[in-house]
Image: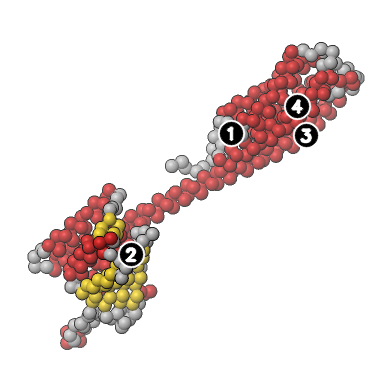
Amino acid sequence: MTEYSPPGAFRPSRLRLHPGPTQLRLMRMTAGAVGLAGLVFGILAIGPFVEQHQDEIRPLAVLSFAVLVGLPVAIGLWGSWAPLRVLMTLAALESVALPLVLVTWPLAHGDASLQSHGIPWPLGISALPIVCLAVVARGALVWGYLGLIGALTVYVMFVSNAAEDALLLAIQTGLYAASFSSIFVGLVLVGLQSAERLDLLQAGERVGAARNAARVAREAERARFDGLIHDGVLSTLLMAGRADQLHGDHVRQARNTLAQMERIASGTSATGVLSAERVIFEMRRLATQHAVRFVVEVGEETSVDDLRMPAEVVEAMLAAGGEAMRNSIAHAAGRQSGVSALRQPARRVERRAELWLHADVVVLGVRDDGVGFDPERVRPERMGVARSIVGRMNEVQGGYAVVDSRPGRGTLVTLGWLRR
């Protein structure tokens, strides 16, 4: 997992070598805009180019025009879909080409006068290479490059003008060109910086979500293990401790508990499907272990032979049903203390487990007519209801559990599963 580092926690590269998804989309959109601008400005620069080279069109001038106009168009065509390194290579070539063209301007163009031939044609598209560099580089490098182009603009204007005030006019033109370009450069840099911050925030949110998911998974695993200890290990020890000798039910309970512990240790759960006959058999045996009357009801249009249930659902329902039966045995008769408890006979409690089998719904109800209780007043540290019954059934897909009880009115625990 990659840790999130807030802005300012590290010194970023001068180039945008590893942009986030939002920043990369904005880089590609800007590249498309550069391509369109390169096509428009290239068409507009044809007239000044021909006019300024009407006496002699030198090969170096033609190459300069082709490179300065062609590279932005190529960036627009390929930068929106090609790999990032292609976009960065084209932008780097364009940003290098403009200074070379301006430095070699006297060699390519000669000493033409400003009054006769107008402003040198490369200055009309000088903003494009600067924007190209702004797409792939960060602020300090871009602003330094902008200052370099401004100085070269003054140089080209000065050597191309034979008037007495050539230097003043060159400085004015350089300042104007730099100011004009800085508007577009600023917009691009601010937009990309905002996109970068958004990517960092999203990365931080993803890390936070992953941590929360890991925490929830750990808590669920801990709760699952606590439930197994509460329902399996302790109940097995209790059964063995109260019995004069071990019976087959005790051995099966111990084996089931060990199997569940092994699955938790290996990170797996019960797999496969069980037939309705097997489900009825297991639940009948569970009721027999706890001396609870067991009743089965099958839907009118339901065939027992065709019913199947996921093994993990059956395991959860058996565990939750067993916990409901144990709670009924432990608490349904009520708790008394003092000398009067020795004189009073134990309260007789009727217990009943009812299994409804339907095509898409399976419900197990465990009821008694005991003293009952208020579910809202159960302490959080008591895992019998919250964890071992409701929590266990809620963990399986389609499972649910409802505990209905009131003081003096008995208790009904409903465990259900909906086929989805």
Q: Which residue is mark 1?
A: 81
Label 2 is placed on what type of residue?
Ala
Q: CA distance from mark 4 to mark 1?
A: 23 Å
Mark sitting earlier along the chain (2/3): 3
Mark sitting earlier along the chain (1/3): 1
Q: Quadrant of the N terminus?
A: top left
Q: CA distance from mark 4 to mark 3?
A: 18 Å
Residue 239 found in image quarter: bottom left
The residue that appears at 28% across and 53% down in the rendered structure is: 272
The residue that appears at 70% across and 38% down in the rendered structure is: 186
Residue 10 located left or right of residue 165: left
| Residue found at the very far front of the displayed protein | 301
Q: Is residue 51 visible?
A: yes
Q: Quadrant of the C terminus?
A: bottom left
In this view of the protein, which residue sits in the foreground, 15 or 355?
Answer: 355
Please state which of the two labelled residues, at mark 4 or mark 3, is closer to the viewer. 4
Mark sitting earlier along the chain (4/1): 4
Label 1 is placed on what type of residue?
Trp
Mark sitting earlier along the chain (4/3): 4
Label 3 is placed on what type of residue?
Phe
Q: Which secondary structure lies at badge 3? A: helix
Q: Which secondary structure lies at badge 1? A: loop
Q: CA distance from mark 2 to mark 4?
A: 73 Å
Label 4 is placed on what type of residue?
Gly
Which labelled disc corresponds to residue 42? 4
Q: Which residue is mark 3?
A: 180
Q: Which residue is mark 2?
A: 359
Looking at the image, residue 277 lies above or below residue 206? below
Q: CA distance from mark 2 to mark 3?
A: 75 Å
In this view of the protein, which residue sits in the foreground, 165 or 416?
Answer: 416
